[in-house]
Image: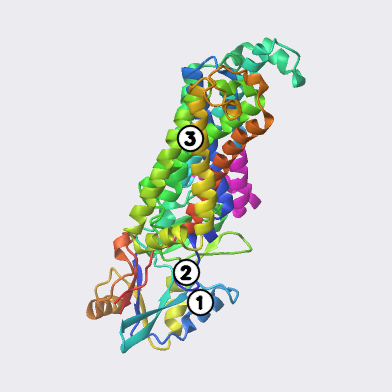
Amino acid sequence: MARYGMLIDLTKCAGCMACTVSCQLQNDLPPEVHFIKFYQQEYGTFPVVSLVNIPVQCQHCEKPPCVYNCPTGASYIADGGVVLLNESKCIGCKYCMTSCPYNARVLNEETHTPMKCIFCFDHVKEGEQPMCVQTCLGEARVFGDLDDPESELNKQINEKKARPLRPDLGTKPKIFYVW
Amino acid sequence: MYPGQIMPGQIWGWIIALYLFLAGMSAGAYTTAYLSQRLYPHLKVIRWSGYIVAPPLVIIGLVTLMIDAEAGFFHPWRFFFLYIGNPSSIMAIGVYILTLFTPLALYRAVVSLAEIWRDGGEKKWPLGLDRFFARPPEWLRWFVEGRGWIDFLGLVMAVATATYTALLIGNIHAVPFWNNSILPVLFVVSAFSTGIAITLFTATAWDPKVQEHYAPYLALSTSLKGLELFLLFALLYFSWYGDQAAKASTADLLWGRLALPFWILLVVLGLALPLRYELQERKHLLAGHVPALAASVPAGDKRPVDAGSLSPRLFATSQIMHLFAIVGGFVLRYLILLAGHFVYFLPTW
C-alpha cells in the first residue's frame, strides 16, 4: 500500500485560499469551518521584509498523537497512512483536538465529534488527486506516494529540500513544506 | 498563539477542570481517611467524613465528564469502546482506574455507614439499613465488617486516580505548559491537600469537637500547601525558560490575561491565606488551645479550653479557610487548562 504524502511549496503559494474553499465544498462544510487554515508569518529584517502564507491542515503523521491518545480507538491510521476518524466509536472527549500540535481538528457542532482533512480518501482510492491539489492555481501542492522513489512528490521534496513543520515533536508529519 | 487559532483551554474548559479537581479531591479525601484509620483509629469522625465524601465527589466528576463528552452522552453505548478501543491511551487507563476506584470508595462508604450505625447505638435507620447491618447475608458479611486489604486496594487506586488526572493532560506534547514532570507532582499534592480540606471541613461541620485533634492533619496540610507553592514556582520557572509556548503561558499567568485570578484567587486566597491560618491554628492546638477560641483567649493564658463552646464567628473562619483551599484546588486546575498554549509550528527564518 502506498504511503501518501504532500508537498506545499510556500514560495508558489499566493494565499488565494482556493484550496480552503474547494475543501469546504468537497466536505460540505459551513463557511466558518476550515480544514485548511491559513496562517501568515513575517520574515526578514527591515527594510528587506516579506510575508508568507502558510496553509496548514492535518499532517497525517506517521506517529499521530491524536490516534495514540484516542481512548476509544475512533481515530485510526487507515490504508495509505491516512489518519481517519470512525465517528460511530467517538465519544467526543476532544482529547485528539488537544493532542494535535498542528491544531488540525475542528469540532462538528451537529455530531459533537471532531473533523479534519482526510486527504480526500475516497478520491485518492480511485486514483484521483485530493481536492486542494486539483484546485491549487499556482501548482504549489504536490500529492503522491512517499514510498515510490520515482514519484513527482519525492523528486520535488529532494530537489527543493522540503521539510515538515516541527519534526522535533516526533510525530513524523507527512506534509512537507518548501520555504 | 497565532491569530485565529483556538486555545487548548477553549477545547477543554471548566467542565474538564471541575472533573480533574473532583476526581483529585475524592482521591485525596480517601487517602486522608485511610491515613486517619491507620494512624489515629480513635478519630472516627474524621475517618468517616473522608470515606463518605469520597464517592459522591468522584461520581459527580464522572457525570460532568460524560455530559461534556457530548457525542458519547447522546450515544451512550459508545462509552463501551473506552474499555476495548485503545487500552494504551492514558484516558482509557484512567477509565480502568476509575472503574476500580469508584466501587472501592463506595464500598468503604458503606462500611463506614455500618461503623456509624454500630457506634450510634444500633438505632433504627431508614431503608431497612439497620436490619442489613445487623444481619447481613453470609456472602455480604465483608460488606458490613470491612476488610483491611480492600481498604488498601482503595488507597492504591486513589493514588492512581490523582496521578492519572495529571498524566491525562501531561502527556499532551502539543501543549508544553502541561507536558512536563512537575505538573503530575503538583496535581497529586493539590489533590491531597484539597482532600484534607474537604475531610476536615466535613468533620468540623459534623462534630466541632474533633477540631482538638487536628494538629497532625494541619501539619500535613500546611506542608502540602507550602510544597504546592514551591511546585507552582518551579512549574512557572521552567516554563519561562523552556518552550516558546510555555513561556507565553507563564506570561499569561504572571502578568497577562490570567494574572488577576492567578494572584488573587489561587496564590493569595487559595494557598497563602489558608496556609497562614492553618499554621496559626496548628500553633494554638499544640499550645493546648482550641484554634477558634485561641484568638479570644488573652495572650499568655494557657488554660485548656472546652472545644464544645466554640465562638461561632471564629468557628466559621476555620471552615471558610477550608473552603478557600478547596476552591483554590479548582482554580489551580482551571487556570492551568486556560493558560495552555499550543506549540508554535510555523516555519521561522
Residue A111 visible in the current orientation: yes
As for residue A94 lying within the magenta part, the answer is no
Is B66 rendered above or below residue B151?
below
For disc 2, the chain is A
Residue A88 pos. (x, y %): 57, 55
**Residue wearing tag 3:** B192
Secondary structure at numbered mark 1: helix
Q: Which image quarter is the C terminus of chain B in?
A: bottom left
Q: CA distance from mark 3 to mark 2?
A: 42 Å
Q: Amino acid at mark 2?
A: Cys
Q: Which residues are magenta?
A: B58-84
Is the residue B309 above or below the residue A116 in the image?
A: above
State the mark number for residue A23.
Answer: 1
Tell me the CA gap for discs 1 and 2: 8 Å
Is A170 situated left or right of B318 in this image?
A: left
Relative to B9, residue A165 above or below: below
Tell me the subunit letter for badge 1.
Answer: A
Tell me which residue sits at (47%, 78%) in the image. Answer: A131
Residue at label 2? A117
What crowding class fits label 3: few (fewer than 14 Cα within 10 Å), some (14-19), or many (20 or more)?
many
